[in-house]
Image: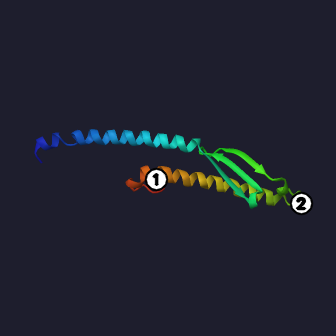
Amino acid sequence: MARGRMSNFGGSNMNNLMKQAKKMQQDMQQAQEELEAKTFEATVGGGMVTVVANGKREILEVNIQPDAIDPDDVEMLQDMIVAAVNEVLRKIDDAAQSIMGKFTGGFGLPGMF
């Protein structure tokens, strides 16, 4: 290869690539902040237990209907709480995958988010 071609390697293309990378990083940060600000809700047991969480995966509320409280069957209530928490966390993960997948989809990085 001629030296002249080598010294120009990447010049303006590299600058454009760096600008694009910076813009993508800013867009990803904004998308992450928007996700964290959202709330997610999951209800199980026909409305007996509802869990609300934010996009940071923090549980904000656990609502239990009085009918769900059976002193003779505490395990059922515990199971419904666990199911509702797992469901709300799955919803957050799905939303994160959908939002962040827009940025990672073209890079062949499955499961990155």
**In the rendering, at what x and y percent does residue 77 appear?**
80, 57
- Tell me if label 1 and label 2 are in contact, CB under 8 Å: no
Q: Nearer the viewer, residue 50 or 58?
A: 50
Apparent side of residue 104 relative to residue 48 in the rendered image (left or right) = left
Apparent side of residue 12 relative to residue 28 in the rendered image (left or right) = left
Residue 93 at least partly seen:
yes
Residue 34 in the image: above or below residue 102: above
Question: Which residue is depicted at the point 50% across and 53% down?
Answer: 98
Label 1 neighbourhood size at 10 Å, few (<14), some (14-19), many (20+)?
some
- The dot on residue 19 is none
* Mark positioned earlier in the residue sequence (1 or 2): 2
Label 2 neighbourhood size at 10 Å, few (<14), some (14-19), many (20+)?
few
Residue, disc 2: 72
Question: Which residue is depicted at the point 75% across and 61% down?
Answer: 46
Going by the numbered disc 2, the residue's amino acid type is Asp
Q: Nearer the viewer, residue 47 or 10?
A: 47
Question: Which residue is depicted at the point 51% across and 43% down?
Answer: 32
**In the rendering, at what x and y percent does residue 8 appear?**
17, 40
Residue 113 at least partly seen:
no
**In the rendering, at what x and y percent does residue 19 appear?**
33, 39
Q: CA distance from mark 1 to mark 2?
A: 46 Å
Residue, disc 1: 101
Q: Secondary structure at mark 2?
A: loop
Rendered image quadrant of residue 90: bottom right
Count of numbered circles in the view: 2
Going by the numbered disc 1, the residue's amino acid type is Gly
Q: Which residue in the rendered view is the most extreme toward the right?
A: 72
Question: Which residue is depicted at the point 66% across and 51% down?
Answer: 41
Q: Secondary structure at mark 1?
A: helix
